[in-house]
Amino acid sequence: SVNPDLASERQTASFSVEKLMAWLDGGVEHTRMRRAVVEAIERDPVFSRENQYFQSQNERYEAAVRKAVHLQKKMREMGWTENGPEYKYIYRALAGDVAFLLHRIFMRSISMLGSDQQVSKWIPLATQYQIIGSYAQTELGHGTYLQGLETTAVFDTTTQEFILNTPKVSAMKWWPGDMGRSATHTVAFAQLYVQGKCYGVHPFIVQLRSLWDHSLCPGITAGDIGPKMSFEHADNGFLMLQNVRVPRENMLSRFCEVQPDGTYVRWGSQKINYFTMTNVRISLLSDEVIVPVMKACTIAIRYSVVRRQSKLKPGEEEAKILDYQTQQEKLLPQLATTYAFHFITDYLQELFDRAYEEIQRKNFDTLPELHAFSSGFKAFVTQHCTSAVEICLRACGGHGYSLLSGLPSLYTKILASCIYEGENTILLLQTARFLIKCFMAASAGQPVPPSVTYLAAMKSRKCPAKNKLDFLNPDIYTEAYQHMAARLVSSTAAKLQDLIQSGVKKHDAWNQCTVQLAQAAKAHCHYITVKNFVETVEKLKTQAGIQKIMKHLCDLFALHGIFSNAGAFLYDGYLSGAQMDMVTASYLDLLPVIRKDAVPLVDAFDFSDKSLNSALGSYDGQVYQRLYEWAQKSPTNTQMSPAYERYLKPLLHNKLSKL
Amino acid sequence: SVNPDLASERQTASFSVEKLMAWLDGGVEHTRMRRAVVEAIERDPVFSRENQYFQSQNERYEAAVRKAVHLQKKMREMGWTENGPEYKYIYRALAGDVAFLLHRIFMRSISMLGSDQQVSKWIPLATQYQIIGSYAQTELGHGTYLQGLETTAVFDTTTQEFILNTPKVSAMKWWPGDMGRSATHTVAFAQLYVQGKCYGVHPFIVQLRSLWDHSLCPGITAGDIGPKMSFEHADNGFLMLQNVRVPRENMLSRFCEVQPDGTYVRWGSQKINYFTMTNVRISLLSDEVIVPVMKACTIAIRYSVVRRQSKLKPGEEEAKILDYQTQQEKLLPQLATTYAFHFITDYLQELFDRAYEEIQRKNFDTLPELHAFSSGFKAFVTQHCTSAVEICLRACGGHGYSLLSGLPSLYTKILASCIYEGENTILLLQTARFLIKCFMAASAGQPVPPSVTYLAAMKSRKCPAKNKLDFLNPDIYTEAYQHMAARLVSSTAAKLQDLIQSGVKKHDAWNQCTVQLAQAAKAHCHYITVKNFVETVEKLKTQAGIQKIMKHLCDLFALHGIFSNAGAFLYDGYLSGAQMDMVTASYLDLLPVIRKDAVPLVDAFDFSDKSLNSALGSYDGQVYQRLYEWAQKSPTNTQMSPAYERYLKPLLHNKLSKL
């Protein structure tokens, strides 16, 4: 039975949850397919996550391998393929904890960087899991800065082999997934040396473990890097190479090759690599970032209408905590942010698809813009979503801190997204470099991509809003964001220029502006996100009920951003103090309006209870009962501890059993 | 041997680390005593935390009990007592993971709330560990709002007993430490009923487990609440009571009593309870909050001079990451914050000690101020420190995410401090209530405590600073903070008044202002922290070298706060945009200055390597070597996984061992 406090929230929805769901899925037929995949996965006991919160790192690794192997079978059974329409729902249904994700990256890198012969040799083996691959790029001493990698591959003309070495501890490969305990092969990145000359970092296929008995191959030292904040199931590994010889054919050679006599030849364009990173960053946003934050909102908002605490009015019953302004102000902006980012990832995907068409026509012009967008949004979205999940966790008080709430594991996992696939600060600075360049070009009258023409076209210097309702006008707030972003870019460009003109060297000047450059990049992403949200709402015209609530969320997202970054809007007087009061008033007024639809808005994300795996967030709201039931299954209750016999009995044991 | 990149940082310190350390400890003799305690604890293998990151919840519980029992012996051996001067260093040296902290709260509550007979019966038993106590207040359904507790205690005149019950699932006691598996007794809070009348929440001593064989007593259901984000060593428990009878003498009766005929008598003042909470909140700040943030800064800053990545200048070697402005801007404000909060806890302790003297003279006048301070600062400090630890973790990139860095466990532990001992938002609103009250009183010409007289005495309306150097003048920035805090309090008071005058009911009006009230409370705490930092630096006059660097940190703390909350200072034109540029310039200029002394500034916190338990943060900076050594000890490397035999072998096993 559904908790009545939660049930009542669903009876007053201002829109149809099913319709919103279908719209979010991109059509009711997608909703149907998604649900069919979820059901097939959840019906299968091998994929159960029931005891996940009680498992050790070893147990989770084992379960992840079991699931990955079973998944192959399941896919054949169900007729699902890697290129089929169901595929994107599988990972969401599994909710992580599946091994061999790096095996897929191994395959992708061979497909893209390997010659036709290499592809036809390795891909069939990998597809059938006759080998398991990994992707060994990051080292103990080097992550984002790839040129600094220290692993070496020296070409030996006499044997036609590359000799791979880990010359020092910091050169050890560190972090690659699937490598610690599983992989038989890896693509290892190393500095290529031919006849004493260094040609930079190149990829080599290296065998790590015997296919006969899985023992480590000669010259290989490998293992697991130990416990991390999350990803317990993944065997992130280390790898040391001592005079490991691989044949000349094992250097991936779609774009370059070492010929038998040692001649180094390079052909084709490597820009396509650039493009792959872009693709990875965009797809990680929807899979690894938006999904967790949707789940966190679902859990925290459902819990906040079941939890009653203290009284809003003397003499009444205790209030649902979501009826407190402070709780609304914690959670509802996160909900709006989730929708905003869901829409921006769609936008990025479209941008990517369009660029891909161009690239197939050998037109690489859109690449710099695409790279700047994917870098900046990766940083902007992961940072906001990580903070959103943390807010959701803290808003659930003590119970949010229990692993059984599901929130801690969402948090520790999403936090990693700020670090992997490019460190966020470095990514923001790449976006900033693009913005500065475009600003300079546009100021000099040169053409720039449409998304950044605004930089050189600052409109009004004052916001025209006269009362708080004006701030519910998307033109008003979109323009405020545009102004703010353009101002931050132009003023940082000016500071950079001033420093250089005053004699500071270019790289020093750049370093002295990086704090502000990162701010400017964020402001740009914020502006684009607001603008895209507004456009998404406008397109919804035919679905009035949904459009109305989406408009409220869009307003809330925009005004929350102004409220929390007030300084950036007040700084040059674009907004006055009185206007900031109007923003605050409109912002706070929106909270009780959206609060009424909060539960339907998270119901529309349509996560099953198994997928949420949360004692606080289930559809029926039986929070306390479930916490109690789950706790009883914990090994702290099911396994006897020797602590009593060993340490307590000598102290406590007493003829008088009761005092 | 010390990593040369770290060693060189120590040769250029602008002050004596030993002198700073002695000053922070409150005298060189304290440093000596602290080190002696640390050495004695760390020399003892029972207290080792060496494998902590690899242990299960059960193993950590067992180790915590072992340590707690051993600690008693150790203290006798060493001649340390609970009231001795060494005592405060013991817990720091143990670095958590010791059982029976709630046993101490059990004893404290009996000492304070129990009658003399109760004290003389229970305290000796507890002191000798013949019983183990817990403190059962929080329930599944109620935390901070104590009046809402649902456990009942009904007085039965015929048997002279209280009958305790858990009437529904949400009334189950949930979270109490030491209760899940260890405690034989607890102080349980329940609604007292006598002859059908409810007298509110009272404390009762209840036996949970047999002293003979540790089995649960009749009517008791108890166990462990399962895994949490941290505190794996603590057996946080649940407790259900079914007609559990305790004698009349088991209600703690220093302040009230149920007499044999059922007459309820109350005497004395309960204000002292109020005072205890205050004390707990202040002491938790130094023990549980400042220490972790000091450790996080130590780890992140040492790592940031060992880690080299990318190039600042073309052609040069890779730069230490602490030489990048963005890395400085992440870490150095956290370092300044750590110092600021170290000083503010000293200030709060003094305030508390002065109040305690007054209370002993039966003067309770300072209690409201003390309560407001301890509530507000608990929230303000825990929130900033939690965010500081997260920043440190993320600033270490991938390696910060490894448990071996020590940062994840510092983060997950400090995060709890935002939730326990009063939820932060509720605490801020208590402070806000005090501030509004004082503002109204002061505006009406009534006397208010000296710490809040500023509220009614707003000075200049414009900041007088003319150039960026003016912002290194403590008067300038302290006044800016004062102005901002006073404005937020007065404008929220005005909004509250307006709402009430326009007919909104008082409690609704309050709820509609809570977002702004919480901001006002934070602003007040921020102002007091800045002011106290300035005063602390002024008092340092005799120690010029230390004073200079402390002045820099004070400036950085203050300017960082203005830079990050620009809106609050720009809003009413107190600062102009041009002045904000000066703040930004001065703020960014300070970073490279303090960066030079960053390592000595964290060395002065004087944590041993064992205490840090971090592969990244050790004194010698042998980061990569240690990560590799520690990882090899992980159970993921020392235990064979059945995954290969079960799942991988059938796929991979191949006559051709090598491809």
Image (cartoon, coloured by chain):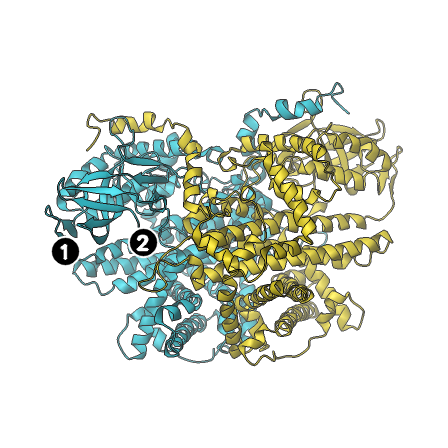
Chain colours: A cyan, B yellow
Residue B387 visible in image: no
Q: Secondary structure at mark 2?
A: helix
Do marks 1 and 2 share a chain? yes
Instruction: Note whether residue B602 is visible.
Output: yes
Image height of A119 relative to A539, above or below: above
Q: Quadrant of residue B315?
A: bottom left
Depicted A509 relative to depicted A62: above or below: below
Residue B167 x %, y %: 68, 34
Q: Amino acid type of disc 1?
A: Trp
Q: Nearer the viewer, residue A281 or B525?
A: B525
Q: Position of residue B331 (x, y in %)?
A: 50, 58
Q: Which residue is mark 1?
A: A267
Disc on the earlier residue, 1 or 2 = 2
Q: Which residue is mark 2?
A: A148
Chain letter of mark 2 equals A
Q: Quadrant of the C terminus of chain A?
A: top right
x, y percentage for residue A238? 35, 40
Outermost residue toward the left?
A261
Residue positioned 88% across, 38% down in the render = B263
Q: Quadrant of residue A204?
A: top left
Q: In the rendered image, which quarter contains the N terminus of chain A? A: top right
Please indicate whether residue A362 sits to the left or right of residue B217 in the image: left
In depth, the one of B503 and A376 nearer the eye is A376
Chain letter of mark 1 equals: A
Task: Tell me the amino acid under the disc marked 2.
Answer: Gly
A481 vs B641, nearest the viewer = B641
